[in-house]
Image: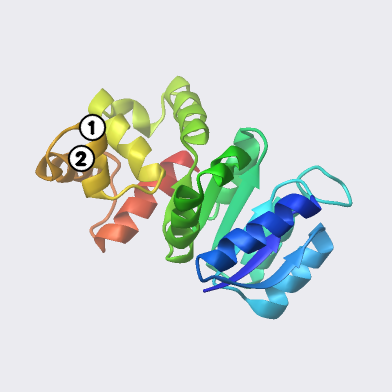
Amino acid sequence: MRVVLAEDLFLLRDGLVRLLESYDFEVVAAVDNGPGLLKALLDHEPDVAVVDVRLPPTFTDEGLQAALAARRQVPGLPVLVLSQYVEQLYARELLADGSGGIGYLLKDRVFDPDGFVDAVRRVAAGGTAMDPDVVAKLFATENRRGGPLSGLTPRELEVLSLMAEGRSNAAIARQLVVTERAVIKHTSNIFAKLGLPVSGADNRRVLAVLAYLG
């Protein structure tokens, strides 16, 4: 699997390259600035991009904006964003186009190599990988607004939040200590309450997360 990596801190960038390569990823480019990231993404069209939000030259949202610009030119380009802090605006910008293949993780998650690599693979496969802290803040904001999520039960919100993190039905069942059949029932109720059209199961999961968190 081919990866473009963007991180301005040399030690972290080098560490991420070594980590990804140890899990059989091919890092085709590792850059340290926004313009270099955009060029690398368009030149290589990787299977997934792993991108620090804040890159030179502005150190604001240069990495995110470069990734979004590349995604507009290469629709569906999978992007996993890394951030030091939860920034709801950045998360919503990433979610705004309503398609899958996106992730938003806090940098601390890198210290769990298996979990981090699993998130990279989920995003590359067209799924979502949202940090639990990001999901919690987005849910809280949406509920205060009285949006579509306000019609879900507390258990359905729990299931949807775990879906947003990219968990499978089996993983959700283990987390909530319920049967997988119960999770399937909850997800069906979520799809119905959010008015999502019948389609492939994976696509409906992505739509449920993106349409109502984005």
User: Tags 2 and 1 in contact by the CB under 8 Å rule?
Assistant: yes
Residue under numbered circle 1: 176
Estimate the x, y position of residue 75 in percent, counting from the top left.
Answer: 56, 69
Residue 40, picture quadrant: bottom right
Estimate the x, y position of residue 44 in percent, counting from the top left.
Answer: 67, 78
In the image, residue 158 sits, relative to residue 37, either above or below, namely above
In the drawing, does residue 122 fall left or right of residue 78? left
Callout 1 amino acid: Leu
Callout 2 amino acid: Ala
In this view of the protein, which residue sits in the foreground, 119 or 197? Answer: 119
Estimate the x, y position of residue 107 in percent, counting from the top left.
Answer: 62, 42
Determine crowd level at label 1: few under 14, some 14-19, many 20+ residues with C-alpha closer than 10 A. some
Residue 189, picture quadrant: top left
Estimate the x, y position of residue 181 in percent, counting from the top left.
Answer: 10, 44
In the drawing, does residue 26 fall left or right of residue 29? left
Residue under numbered circle 2: 173
